[in-house]
Amino acid sequence: MKNSRLHSSWTPWLFLAPFLLTFGAFIAWPAVRSLMLSFEQTFGPRTTAFVGLANFRFLIHDPYFWTAVWNTLLFTIAAVLVQIPAALGLALLLNRSDLRGRRFFRLVFFAPSVVGLAFVAIIFSMLFEKRTGLINGTLHSLFPAWDPDFPWLDQYVMPSLILAQLWLSAGFYMVYFLAALQTVPSELLDAANIDGASAWQRFRHVTVPEIRPVLNLITLLVVIGSFQFFELPYLLYHETYGNGPENKALSIVTYLYQTGFRSGDLGYASAIGWVLTLVLVGLALLQRQLTKREEA
Amino acid sequence: MNAPAPRRLIRPGTLIIYGVLGLFGVITLLPFLWMLCAALKTKEEFFASQFLPHGHGLFGVAWDQLTLVQFKRLFTELALPRALLNSIFLASVGSVVATLFCAMGGYGLSKFRFRGRETLTFTILGTVVLPVALLLSPRFETLFHLGLVNRYLGVFLPAFAPAFGLYLFRQAMLNSVPNDILESARLDGCGEIRIFFQIVLPIVRPMVSAFLIITFIGLWNDYITPQIILQSPELQPLSVAITNLKGLHTDDYGLIMAGTLVSITPVMGLFFLLQREFISGLTSGAVKG
């Protein structure tokens, strides 16, 4: 766009002002403030002292932090291995020109995504109930050998969380894959078909390369989202403030929240948050590099 | 896109696909159905049957056992109507203002040249990776100093500037608002504010409606921010109210399911009505169609 001086130079700032003022006060400033806090120790509401890297050093030897890291990593790996194939699988099933009712199925699979996490936590706390819950009840009536008192939330913490998250987000990511699949040229698939390529070969060598940018993006979104895993375990294990039995539900962000809001140690909470942020920035940059190399 | 089906008969392969889709569809919907059944039963009946109460009525269901008593309790004994109004208020005002702020900001970023534009865009977008929980305590501190704790404005203000909304509008305007139109409008002496509201906004109208729904649903579902900022029960939205209800009435399953149902039905309805806008808005940033 040529800068014809038809508008004055402050015009863009006029339009940006409302956003930038609120953004500055409630996102940018808290971010800067938390960075400052991460080098301080908080004693009560008004007293703080600069402690350098002490918070970060403490982090390295904090067993709770490492428990949280381990749980978060486990959840992230499972999320990538379960949610993405499920979402892509549903999208592939729906992406057929001869399929009737595609919009209906899309609606059905997407519906859980509009349910808020607070409500998902309430629903699943009841679905997972031992005798009265839907899951044990259904499994027991289908397979009489299934124990109706199967202790989902008590002993199978991670599978429970993964299952709830899968119900919630498979349809959400499916929508992205479906949009991407519709951009794959059908001539390419037809040509491969004529050349005798099997369904798997067509998927592997035609579809996947075509949807690769979206696949990469969704993987990044799933990883970032899973690293920030918080409200679901926090609310599903509300009585233990998100710890769960034997701290098995404790995620990094839950620990951050507990440290900041329950223990009032804002400095240490900020240090946890910034370490997590740096890891996420690293992952995002890594993904950018990989995408660039693939495009080159 | 849609090639005519080669054969009129449904092929066995297609039948299998319908079977698989149907199975997953039922699994996806079962929790909703279960919730509805639980909400229509008394506390005693909840433990006696999985879905609908067994009896001698049509299809072996005791239809006369179904009751609206749980909903009645929610609306008369408990403060649910107030929480429902709070949710409607928070989500509608919040989404309208956030959409306006993002559309204006996106216009400023996409259709004007100024120094530091790219840096500004990149910095704002970069904040997406910040964990929300990290910002909560410093934000609370700021709101406390401004006297906005336990006030709706304390929930609104941080929600007015979502970084990804600014990015979505920036992209939409880069792609679909031609510079010539803006230039000729300026030559005709049209004011900047009028250009924005009468020319730019109508062009990106699909994005406006999509983003309105996305933020409405997001704000409706938000739990942690109102939980921290709004301490008085009469100010709290459904997400907080229902979670507290569950803490108080732990084994009152029917009541809790009825409350959850009331909480998710409005956004479900909105989504069913406007699903096309909603989904296209979500995917527009990610998939080049």
Image (tube, rainbow, N blue to C red):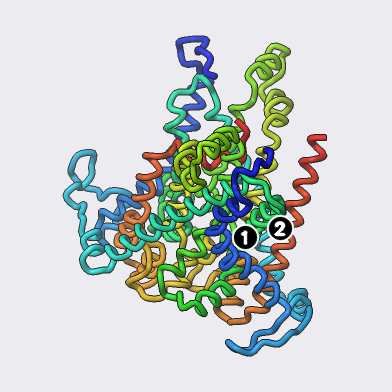
Question: For the point 63% across and 56% down, which residue is it?
Answer: B128
The amino acid type of the residue labelled 1 equals Gln
Q: Secondary structure at mark 1?
A: loop
Q: Are marks 1 and 2 on the same chain?
A: yes
Question: For the point 50% across and 54% down, which residue is it?
Answer: B101
Q: Give B186 or B101, whichever is nearer the viewer.
A: B186
Coordinates of residue B278 in the picture (x, y in percent): 47, 41
Q: Chain of mark 2?
A: A
The disc at residue A280 is: 2
Q: Secondary structure at mark 2?
A: helix
Q: Chain of mark 1?
A: A
Drawn side of residue B287 relative to residue B193, left or right = right
**A188 versus A247 height, above or below:** above
**Image quadrant in which you'd find residue B26:** top left
Q: Give A123 or A175, whichever is nearer the viewer.
A: A175
The amino acid type of the residue labelled 2 equals Leu
**Image quadrant in which you'd find residue A93:** top right
Drawn side of residue B174 relative to residue B234, left or right = right
For the C terminus of chain B, which image quadrant?
top right
Coordinates of residue A29 in the picture (x, y in percent): 62, 69
Coordinates of residue A196 in the picture (x, y in percent): 71, 14
**B215 versus B83 height, above or below:** above
Q: Which residue is mark 1?
A: A228
**Category of crowding for the residue at label 2, using alpha-carbon neighbours closer than 10 angstroms: few (below 14), some (14–19), many (at least 20):** many
Q: Is residue A249 shown to the viewer in this render?
A: no
Q: Is residue B232 shown to the viewer in this render?
A: yes
Question: For the point 34% across and 50% down, which residue is it?
Answer: B265
Coordinates of residue B9 in the picture (x, y in percent): 45, 12
Asked whether the residues under the numbered discs 1 and 2 touch, taking CB atoms below 8 Å apart as contact, a structural biologist would say yes
Q: Earlier in the sequence, mark 1 or mark 2?
A: 1
For the N terminus of chain B, which image quadrant?
top right
